[in-house]
Image (cartoon, rainbow, N blue to C red):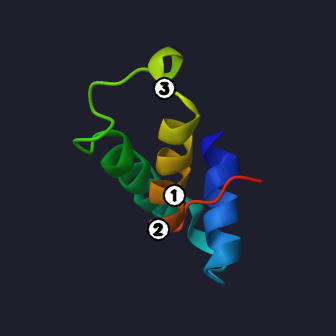
Amino acid sequence: MLAVLTRNYATSHNISETDMDTLEKVVVEKVEAVLLSDEFKEKRARNLDIDDFIKLLLKFNKEGIHFT
């Protein structure tokens, strides 16, 4: 999954995929920042409702992380 997110991030930001290790670290930091934000820090997937998932996707989109 991380490889897909990294590739999507590189594509959406017009970054060449030559240094994928560095880019992967950036993506990991962004994903962790979103998941550890106050709003989602203590929540688990099974307890999220549709509105929570939409908020989570919006936060990822604002960080440049897109799911395809």
Amino acid type at image mark 2: Lys
Q: What residue do we see at 66% from left, 39% from top? A: 1
Q: CA distance from mark 2 to mark 1?
A: 6 Å
Is 1 placed left or right of 52 in the picture? right
The image position of residue 31, as x and y in percent, is: 43, 48
Q: CA distance from mark 3 to mark 2?
A: 20 Å
Binning the other alpha carbons within 10 Å of mark 3 as few (below 14), some (14 to 19) or many (20 upward) gives few
Residues at discs 2 and 1 in contact (Cβ within 8 Å) = yes
Label drawn at residue 58 = 1
Is tag 1's residue or tag 3's residue first in the polypeptide sequence?
3
Residue toward you, 53 or 6 = 53
In the image, farthest residue toward the left: 38
Residue toward you, 38 or 52 = 52
Residue denoted by label 3: 48
Q: Secondary structure at mark 3?
A: loop
Label drawn at residue 36 = none
Residue denoted by label 2: 62
Q: What residue do we see at 37% from left, 40% from top? A: 35
Amino acid type at image mark 3: Leu
Q: What residue do we see at 53% from left, 68% from top? A: 64
